Amino acid sequence: MTRLIVGPFNRVEGDLEVKLDIQDGRVHQAQVVSPLYRGFERILAGKPPLDALVYAPRICGICSVSQSVAAAKSLAVAMGLSMPANGELAVNLIHAAENVADHLTHFYLFFMPDFVREVYSGESWHEDACDRFTAMKGMAARDMLPARAQFMHVLGLLAGKWPHTLTVQPGGSTRSVSAGETARLAAVLAAFRAFLERHLYGDKLERIAGLSSAQELWAWAAEKPASSSDFRRFLQYAQSLDLASLGPSAGRYMSFGSYQEGGAWMFQPGVFTNAETRPLDPGLITEDLSHAWYAAPDGPQAPFAGETRPDADRTDAYSWCKAPRLGGRVMEVGALARQLVDGHPMIRDLVSASGGNVFTRVVARVTEIALVVMAMERWAAALVPEQPFIVHGHMPDEAEGIGLTEAARGSLGHWLRVEKGRIANYQIIAPTTWNFSPRDENGVPGALEQALAGAPVRAGESEPVAVQHIVRSFDPCLVCTVH
């Protein structure tokens, strides 16, 4: 057996290292190492509760709105606040704009450039892939980046700036919009829809969102040449390389639910396993520190009682990432989990055929772009400029709050405890913490560590391409992981 250390990974937010034990040309086992410590939970201790709205978004520069939303939700629970209708719509739009931009960036700039690698030079599609997806030189980036920049005007109109906006508050949004600004929102969304329908899909958003089975997906792909859209290109590459055989999931998926409107969810919360959705009980969430560089208590901790005390001298640890579990079980989170929990028929059909894997994770992410942009159009049209966007309240001296939401990469939770008017404890579990966790006290690997087992490694490969595809299929954000 040989040891191969892959990393740091490029095109990933933050530092990541993967240690692979190779036997007979395949990964025997993996250790996913998050080598950076940041300490935001310790920074927040002792601060006034509302300071979380300033500090939490700075955990990350690409999913800061998700951190804002989770922080605002935890504060809203502690304060007993509910948003007015306009506030919900505005926060949904702000959050969705960031999540969609993350999905788009991942597909075009992080995932697809791997198909340009020389190892694929014998594939019939390789020359087209090089023309389209070579990093920063291919035509796809030239098409996508201006469209993404224009789409981000949604955040300028509704949030004032991005990242690290202060617009999202426990009681709604501080930024009301005029009738003229709602018209500008509609124009921005229409332009972005045009880009998606021309380049990403080569078809109407409604057609993509309405695909209801694996058979329909492949029939749709066959209607036009692969070169007619970037999603069709991906499907061609995925089929020829059998990406459905890479990065298998353990089969347990979780979503905290996202985009609430009038008490209803766009994407339902829950747990999907054994082909059915079950209710989510956040009280079953714990964090295990047995293989992380922190002072380890006796057994896993519930977040409200969680501790973050770094101990870099531990010899039985290998990551700054904690190991979150739901009822003691590993959970995969992300767009695939969201669509399985919510019951998207095509995604469930694909997973029933081949399970969670590199292919189904990317298909779920690309499908979700269409679903969310269509919802954004509805939310923008539903804004009523004359009505309130925010309500205000008082923070008690003693309170607790949980803020659960869905970032682009999956389930994000903030747990807040206030004592004597100050933050007594603040614990955060980010999506990549779930997916990239180390082993727990029972020696059970995290979601990515399990997905890497069995991956092929060619002789002489220092950066195995199969490992690259598997890691990127989770769209990792390591700075959130080690918050």
Image: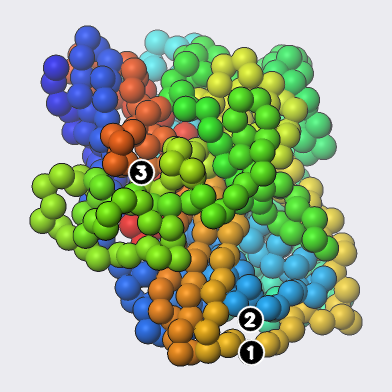
Which label belongs to residue 437? 3
Picture coordinates of residue 241, whole percent (x, y): 47, 14
Tell me which amino acid carries mark 3. Ser
Pick the residue in front: 239 or 136: 239
Q: Secondary structure at mark 1?
A: loop
Q: Residue furthest front?
A: 298
* Residues at discs 1 and 2 in contact (Cβ within 8 Å): yes
Q: Quadrant of residue 359?
A: top right
Local packing at callout 3 (Cα closer than 10 Å; few below 14, some 14-19, many 20+) is: many
Q: What's the mark number on residue 394?
A: 1
Query: Callout 1, which amino acid?
Result: His
The mark that comes first in sequence, 1 or 2, is 2
Neighbour tally class for label 1: few under 14, some 14-19, many 20 plus, Cα within 10 Å: few
Seen at 49% across and 19% down, the residue is 243
Q: Where residue 304 appears, x then y in whole percent? A: 45, 66
Q: Is residue 288 visible?
A: yes
- Quadrant containing the N terminus is top left
In the rendered image, which residue does mark 2 sit on? 79
Quadrant of residue 352 within the rendered picture: top right
Residue placed at 80% from the left, 55% from the top?
264
Q: Quadrant of the C terminus?
A: bottom left
On screen, residue 476 versus residue 276, left or right, reads left
**Mark 3 or mark 2, which is nearer the start of the sequence?**
2
Q: Amino acid at mark 2?
A: Met
Ranked by sequence position, the earlier of labels 1 and 3 is 1
